[in-house]
Image: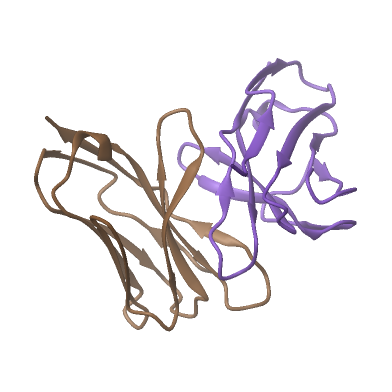
């Protein structure tokens, strides 16, 4: 059974720092991996989607990498800002024909001014 | 702009009552999903639909049902609400497997 783990559960950094969020999954047979952001009281916003054949995706200050063989993905945030404070979740989809996502529990990020 | 809207945003009800949560999307996506989010469990899939008249059970479907009569709407019904169903419920939609899922802002449901 696929399990997705995100460590640490919470992270506090000063503004301007570059940081890395980690996501690991137990079964390397995935279709794709997504990173989401969730603000308090809000739904999830998709940040990056990496197909299983890709190694990384970039959007602005965000870069996500994928190493399927080791069951790991990282989300790199450059020059962090207080507005980046949120919970970040990763999710993997299965290689069968379904669209189901399996989520990690998230990393709660606080960027201090 | 296209969006996905959930209603109500907050609801309090009693055990044993039937409850329906609404989800409406203007993305024109065929694929729609219902999740619940609980501390310690993360997001778990309840039901999903790949198109009109199609519905499928997810990981935690017991006590829930959905129906899909058009592209835009996927209402979630709790047949007989139980306290264990107190949670935050999210609806999502996507254009396909290679596309991201778009989420609504959620419904916070409390069952007393």
Can you say which quadrant of the picture contains the N terminus of chain A?
bottom right
Residue A104: where, in percent of width, then height? 43, 54
Image position of A95 (left or right of A90): right
Residue B78 figure quarter: top right
Can you say which quadrant of the picture contains the C terminus of chain A?
top left
Residue B91: where, in percent of width, then height? 65, 43
Residue drawn at 68 percent across, 18 percent down: B11
Q: Chain A is drawn in which colour?
A: brown
Residue A80: where, in percent of width, then height? 17, 45
The answer to whether A39 is drawn above or below residue A67 in the figure is above
Q: Foreground residue, A55 or B88?
A: A55
Q: Foreground residue, A40 or B62?
A: A40
Image position of B65 (left or right of A86): right
Residue drawn at 56 percent across, 34 percent down: B105
For the rendered model, the colour scheme is: by chain
Direction front: furthest residue: B1
The answer to whether A56 is drawn above or below residue B69 in the figure is below
Q: Foreground residue, A52 or B16?
A: A52
| Number of marks | 0
Residue A59 figure quarter: bottom left
Residue B97 figure quarter: bottom right
Residue B20: where, in percent of width, then height? 80, 30
Image position of B61 (left or right of A40): right
The answer to whether A36 is drawn above or below residue A72 in the figure is above
Q: Colour of chain B?
A: purple
């Amino acid at each position: 059974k696929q399990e997705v783990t995100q460590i640490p559960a919470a992270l506090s950094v000063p503004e301007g720092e570059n940081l890395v969020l980690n996501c690991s999954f137990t079964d390397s047979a995935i279709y794709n991996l997504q990173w989401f952001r969730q603000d308090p009281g809000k739904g999830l916003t998709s940040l990056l989607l990496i197909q299983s054949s890709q190694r990384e995706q970039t959007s602005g200050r965000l870069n996500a990498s994928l190493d399927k063989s080791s069951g790991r993905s990282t989300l790199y945030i450059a020059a962090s800002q207080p507005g980046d404070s949120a919970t970040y979740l990763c999710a993997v989809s299965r290689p069968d024909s379904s669209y189901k996502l399996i989520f990690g529990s998230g990393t709660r990020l606080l960027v201090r001014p | 702009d296209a969006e996905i809207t959930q209603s109500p945003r907050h609801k309090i009800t009693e055990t044993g009552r039937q409850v329906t949560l609404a989800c409406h999307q203007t993305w024109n996506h065929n694929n729609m999903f219902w999740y619940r989010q609980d501390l310690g469990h993360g997001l778990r899939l309840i039901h999903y639909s790949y198109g009109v008249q199609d519905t499928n059970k997810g990981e935690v479907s017991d006590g829930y049902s959905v129906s899909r009569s058009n592209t835009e709407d996927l209402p979630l019904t709790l047949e007989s609400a139980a306290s264990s169903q107190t949670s935050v419920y999210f609806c999502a939609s996507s254009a396909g497997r290679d596309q991201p899922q778009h989420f609504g802002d959620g419904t916070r449901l409390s069952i007393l």
